[in-house]
Image (tube, rainbow, N blue to C red):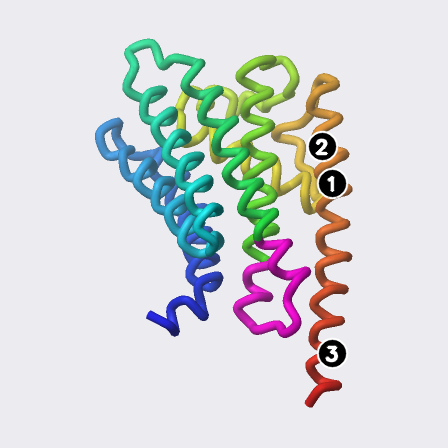
Amino acid sequence: MRSLREWKHTALLATLIAGSVLEPLSVSFSEKTQIVGGVISALIYIVVLLAVFERRWERRLALTLMTCALAASIIHQILPLRSQAGAIAYHCLAGLFLCFAVAVILQRIFTRETIRTDDVIGVLCGYLLTAATWGNLYALVYLIHPTSFRIADTIAGRLGNWHWHRFLFDYFSIATLTTLGFDDIGPADSPVYSLMWIEAVFGQFYIGFVVAQLVGLRLAQAMKR
């Protein structure tokens, strides 16, 4: 159990990578087997809860946000008319949960006196969770104001699928955070433009500032030895 705790961020990274590959694949399954996508999504949230949050109050707050987010997702999927209110609630709660996880990861890195390999992997997990946080914000904007995005016809028709809907905006967020950018989905109105430049600036700040922190800790450890 102790060794598992020491490599918890490694387990989280493996879960995030596996989820990012398997969940969108479930979109091509039948309606009944798409429950696999929901299970994968719930598993990712559970691993985030166990790997990131250590203090009791952190776990209580994170568990509350996670439970409410998953409940909103289930409600959205089982209601006959696919209530948009459930989807909006999910993206709000999921965004808060993931943002809280990123804040805890960064706070822990900035207060450490020594750094381990798993802590470095934790920084990478925080980067991916940052993209997922913004992905929920983009999805929320799309639900409220669909014309804010310019989406290629080849993928626009698949947005009705809940799992594809979430995956698409996470993909768009990663492209923005890394300042890559693609032409299959892009901004078309002011709310998205504002979110994009903030995310792009935050992504560069995250890499530069956190890497400097890690290098400083490594140097301090070397000097002590």
Q: Which residue is mark 2?
A: 196
Along the line of sight, the residue nearer the viewer: 140 or 57: 57
Residue type, label 1: Ala
Residue 43 drawn at (x, y percent): 35, 46
Q: CA distance from mark 1 to mark 2?
A: 6 Å
Along the line of sight, the residue nearer the viewer: 125 or 51: 51
Q: CA distance from mark 1 to mark 3?
A: 30 Å
Q: Nearer the viewer, mark 3 or mark 2?
A: 3
Mark number for residue 200?
1
Looking at the image, is mark 3 or mark 2 earlier in the sequence? 2
In this picture, is 128 found above or below 82? Answer: below
Quadrant, the N terminus: bottom left
Q: Secondary structure at mark 1?
A: helix
Q: Secondary structure at mark 3?
A: helix
Task: Kindly indicate whether the residue at mark 2 contacts the one at mark 1 (C-beta within 8 angstroms).
Answer: yes
Q: Residues within 10 Å of mark 1 (few under 14, many from 20)?
A: some
Q: Which residue is mark 3?
A: 220
